[in-house]
Each structure stands twice: as structure tokens, then as C-alpha cells.
Image: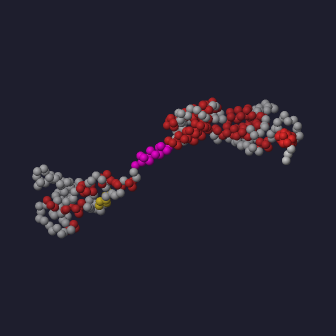
Amino acid sequence: MLSPHWQKSSPQVINRQQNEAELLRQLVENTSNLGGRGGNRNNNQPRQCTYSDFLGTHPPTFERAREPLDADHWLRQTESKFGLLDCTEHQKVLFAAQQLQGSASAWWANYEATLPAGRRLEWNEFKTAFRAHFIPAALMQRKLQEFTDLKQGGRNVLQYSEAFNHLAQYASEYVNTEEKKRYAFLRGMNAKLKERLTWQQTGTYNDLVNAAIVQEGAMRQVEEEDRKRKAPASASETPQAKHRLVFTSPTGQRYRTPLRQQFQRPYAQNYPRPPQQQNLLSRVPYQQQSNQYRAPYQQQGNPNARAPQPADRGGNYPCYNCGRTGHFAKNCTAPRRNNNNNINQRPKPEQKM
């Protein structure tokens, strides 16, 4: 068991050991830094990066700007690599120039030839010259106009936010604060969605995008429910689509009746056909059948009265008794023939001259 004196002084010993360990760690780190600088013991001078260090970050190359944003994208990517290194402003120019290829390399050679002898170009000067050549001011103005005219249209919120962020880099004066960025984003949104976001007056731009995504999902759910509620019944549930009547003419041609005529309670479903016309009517189109006969007619107070006969009663169909047209067999005045004769034995219709 430790003595009371040792227990009392142990916290001080532990603190001293921790301080010594920290000093040792710093000494090892300083020694390694001195070795990397070739023995230079001036701790105030930062270690300069090399081209090998720059290549170790896998910087992108650039040949031409197929689209306006390609040149600016290369600059931003290259500049992000320099953020990992302690390069001087002139080193940045030298290293970035080595990544130019093709027509971009030819541009740099021509531009460098116009500089005074011994002129050491810095990185900001390089970016200005690079943008002036590959991103003209007129093109920048066009992109700014595209940003101010941007509307959501048929895009969803994510697609609209991607287009917004893509063009916002050309309109820094419109998005340099959270309030301006939120206002510009809300200005181009669809009216229905914008109305649901009027309460979102505070927060960041990302908060506004998240709220817009939530409201967009709720709107789609409501629209889907309305669509299902208003959807018409399927064809299998419509009784009119189950059966359609087909009739055959005397020449063998088949007729299919329109659905709207089938379900208007035609004469054939309400009244029996005249017995002498049943065989013939089954061979003619439905529309002709419905025009040949009407419901029985009786004058009020005279049950023996006959319905008025139209001039073309019987139409062009022959009488079953005499073969002439213009009347039915029951009204025929010619002598009656044998009823056992079939349809093939009936007299031929009288030909009109």
C-alpha cells in the first residue's frame, strides 16, 4: 500500500509526465520537418511544396471548354488542390500551366510570350487571363440572365435546386447572403408550391430546400388520391361492354349494333314481331328491323280500329302469299297458298320496271 505522502504527490507526478511526453512528441515532429527541408533549422520558414507534391493530389487537366462552365470548373478544382499544399502564388501558376493541354497549352504559350522578360505571374493574374479567354464577359452576362430567368417549370424540387446552384456561380451578387439566396430560389418556384412555403421566412437556404421537398411530397399524395377518386369505372365493370348484338343480312353480311342503340330498349325487346315476318327479319340489319314495325295502335273508344298504315308499309319486302311488294301477307287479297311451303318455295318478288 502506498504511503500517504506518495498518494498526495501522485497528481503532480502524473502532470509532469504528461508534459514531458508532449515535449518529446513536439521534438520528434520538429526533427522530421528539419529532415524534410534538408537540415534547414529555421522553424519560421514554411516548407515549400514541389511539383511532385502537386501531382500527388491528382489535379485535373484542361484542353478546351466544350461548355462555358468547364473552364471555371477546372479553375475551382485546381485551386482546391492548392489548398492542400503550401505553394507560393508563382508556384501555383507554374504547376497549373503544366496541366494545360492542346489548344489551352497553345494559348498559355502565346500569353506567356507577351509578358515582359523575368515577369513572375501570380495566381490571381493567371485566373483573370484564363477566364477572359475561355469565359468571355458576354457569356458570363448570358449565364447571369439565365439565372435571373430561371423557373422551376416541370422540374421537381431537386432538379430545380441543381439548376439553381449550377447558375448561381455566375450571379454571386444575388446569392452572397442566405437571405438573398433564399429569395432568389423562392422567386422561381411554382405558384402552388411557393404558396405553401410563405411561412418559411427564416432559416438557411438548405432549410428552404428541405421544406420544399416535404411540401412537394404532400402535394403529390393529394393529387394521387384525387386521381383515384375521379377515375372512371373500368370497362369490365360497365354492363354495356359485356355483350353486343350481331345481326346477319339476307346476303350474309354481319352487322354489329352500336352500344348506345343496344341499350335504348329497341322495339324487338318490347313487342313481338309479326308472325309472318319473323324469319325474314332475322336476316336483315337491326336498324332496318326497328323501322318496319311500331307498337299496336288503337283509337280511344274503338278497339277494332286499325293503326294508320304508312304509304311504304312493307317496304321492299315481298308478300309471303303472292310475292308482290307493298303489303304484308295478312293484308294480301290474292288466294291463300299452302302454309307448309318453306322460304325457298315462296314466290319471287315482283320486279319493278
Q: Nearer the viewer, residue 60 or 40?
A: 40
Q: Quadrant of residue 69?
A: top right
Residue 106 position, x and y percent, is 73, 39
15 w.r.t. 275: above or below = above
Q: Quadrant of residue 248?
A: bottom left
Residue 9 position, x and y percent, is 85, 40
Q: Is residue 224 left or right of residue 184?
A: left
Q: Is residue 16 left or right of residue 226?
A: right
Rendered residue at 22%/62% (across/down):
278
Q: Quadrant of residue 21?
A: top right
Residue interval drawn in magenta: 220-232
84 w.r.t. 286: above or below = above
> Main structural element of the magenta stretch: helix, strand or loop?
helix
User: For the C terminus, which image quadrant?
Assistant: bottom left
Indicate yes or no whether the magenta region holds residue 337. no
* Count of numbered badges drawn on the protein: 0
Q: Determine if residue 75 is in view.
A: yes
Residue 108 position, x and y percent, is 73, 37
Rendered residue at 36%/53% (across/down):
238
Q: Nearer the viewer, residue 135 or 282?
A: 282
Q: Is residue 298 left or right of residue 94?
A: left
